[in-house]
Amino acid sequence: MKERHIMNGGLLRDFIIGFADGLTVPFALTAGLSSLGSSKLVVTGGLAELFSGAISMGLGAYLAAITDMQHYDTERVREKKELQECPDEQLWLPRPL
């Protein structure tokens, strides 16, 4: 039997966080704007927040992914260099029980 793993776990996480944030902030904004009594203002403000929030969340996720990739690449180069320069110190041995 072949093991099955989720390959897009990060995508699901980002979707859930974005969905929760995307519902909370516009609701709070439109609830506050509704006290002004203008339904046109409530709809316009809510839509503006939805679009700006989507852009913000998208850019944040993109920058986080780029930073994570750069960190991984830097660590990989460092570890490769350490393996070449001092292989005995990099050897992993299990601890005795």
Image: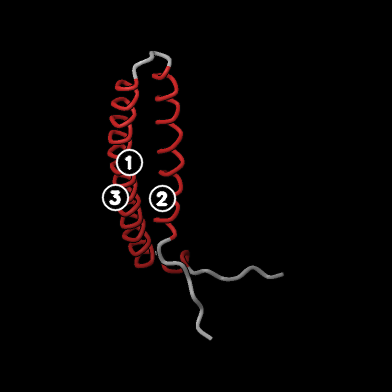
Residue occupied by mark 1: 60
Residue occupied by mark 3: 66
Amino acid at pointer 3: Ile
Where in the figure is residue 22, as x and y percent of width and height?
Answer: 40, 38
Amino acid at pointer 1: Gly
Determine whether 7 is above or below 23 in the image.
Answer: below
Where in the figure is residue 18, as x and y percent of width and height?
Answer: 40, 43
The one of 1 and 44 positioned closer to us in this rendering: 44
Q: Residues within 10 Å of mark 2 (few under 14, many from 20)?
A: few
Residue appearing at x 35%, y 61% in the figure: 76
Q: Quadrant of residue 1?
A: bottom right
The one of 77 and 13 positioned closer to us in this rendering: 13
The one of 4 and 72 positioned closer to us in this rendering: 4
Q: Quadrant of residue 77?
A: bottom left
* Residue 23, numbered label: none
How far apart are the alpha carbons under marks 3 and 1?
Answer: 10 Å
Secondary structure of the residue carrying tag 3 is helix
Residue appearing at x 32%, y 54% in the figure: 69
* Residue 15, numbered label: 2
